[in-house]
Image (cartoon, helix red, strand yellow):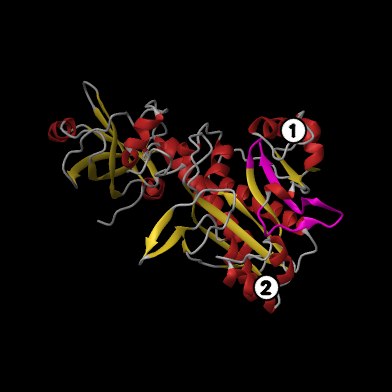
Amino acid sequence: MQRILSHQLPEHIGSAVTVQGWVHRRRLLKSVAFLILRDRGGLVQIVVNADDQRTLLEQLPEETVVEVTGTATANSAAPLGVEITGPAVRTLSAPAVPPPFDLFRPLLTATLPTQLDHAATSLRHNSRTRALKAAAAAAAGFRRTLDANGFTEIFTPKIVASATESGANVFGLDYFGTRAYLAQSPQFYKQLMVGVFERVYEVGPVFRAEPHDTARHLAQYTSLDVELGFIRDHRDVMAVLRDVVAGMTEAVAERLPGFAVPEVPEEIPAVHFTTALEIAGAPADEPDLAPAHERALGEWAQREHGSDFVFVTGYPMRKRPFYTHPEPDRPTHSNSFDLLFRGLEMVTGGQRLHEYADYVSALDGDLTGVESYVEAFRHGMPPHGGFAIGLERFVARLLGAQNVREVTAFPRDLHRLTP
């Protein structure tokens, strides 16, 4: 008999059915036993009355993989209003060794290190699978929005000859006897591909060897990168980002019914960096926003605009990469921005330089390591800009997770290289 999923049972009431999945929980009462089976569709309740089946059930620990054949029977008290009666249970693998936590409980009470040490099983808990589903939905919404607006998805190398971001450490490696690095971002490549497709995006891993042991940093994370040509300035990029974020939250709402996603304003409030410092109560000569400043700006945006999102524009050029376009009327500041989501920086972007001479000037004539990148700007590149979203950080903020590792399947950080 062909297998069906738990959520399909209401379509088969009164019929013989076969389901397969994991023993989620057993309830062994005096007169009857219940098996709660879990599959990718959800949970199904199985009523066990026969003595031989009860004896078998007593020997099957939680997380054992089984097949159950029985009759789909209406019961308003069961999940989806249907349960399986008269079952025949068959194991599909050896009885499982129970994990060091109960997956059937509403909350996963194990410490985060314990969860990460046993990620292969802790990820089966609803709270962890929900986070991974949210990430998948957000990435799908990202792609869907950009595909509908004439963007082309690209795939670029993750082994590169030179560092991309001057402010971050890099992972070095030996590449057939030559020094190489893991890519900190696809920045150079996505800019070059503007010269091919005009509008491009990429979903892929990036690597940052920064010695941060915080709740918001990972050594490897998923970056959602966008670059588009023929812009007027960074505000055109911000408009695209607004639509992308709205598309991402919409997709999460579609795949996680009942989960309240934040409303993305038609126009996200924006403040210049100098004003942001005043709002946050920071010194006027501060070169960047600290986490406390970001939180203060998030509170201001909620209080003054009712928005979970706020743009900060015009960061000082000394804190931005060399390819950043300066403000025309204030060259000490840049045509760049960060998007804060509930008081946390989630996106960095801006307008890029697009003239060869400007790159030579920005690098003081020293093109060592970036020759092929800068060379492309001699062959005609339009005004362009882009942004990058940290997927795990976005999902953590969306779900209210305290640590980005809670929404990452197998996180890599200062101390963790396995599993």
Type of amino acid at the residue the image marks with label 1: Gln
Q: Amino acid at mark 2?
A: Phe
Image quadrant of residue 151?
bottom right
Q: Earlier in the sequence, mark 1 or mark 2?
A: 1
Q: Badge 1 is on which residue? A: 302
Q: Residue at x 53, y 51 (%)?
A: 137
The local crowd at label 2, few if under 14, some if 14 to 19, many if 20 or more residues have their Cα within 10 Å, is: many
Q: Position of residue 253 (x, y in %)?
A: 58, 45
Residue 315 rendering spot, x and y as whole percentages? 74, 46
Which quadrant is home to the C terminus?
top left
1 or 2: mark nearer the eye = 2
Answer above or below: position of 48 versus 418.
Answer: above
Closest to the observer, 418 or 258 = 418
Distance (Cα) linking label 1 and label 2: 42 Å
Image point (59%, 52%), residue name: 166
Where 374 falls versus 173 (above or below)? below
Furthest-front residue in view?
365
Is residue 355 in view from this perspective? no
Disc 1, SS: helix
Residue 137 position (above or below residue 344): below
In the drawing, what numbered circle is on residue 377?
2
Residue 339: say if magenta: yes
| Location of residue 135 in the rendering, given as x and y in whole percent from the top left corner | 51, 48
Bin the neighbour count of mark 1 within 10 Å (Cα to Cα): few under 14, some 14-19, many 20 and up. some
Q: Secondary structure at mark 2?
A: helix
Question: Does residue 145 sit above or below 263 in this rendering?
Answer: below
Range drawn in magenta: 321-345
Query: Is residue 275 a member of the stretch shown in magenta?
Result: no
> Most extreme residue toward the bottom, as rendered?
379
Please name whichever residue, 58 or 376, is drawn nearer the observer in this view of the structure.
376
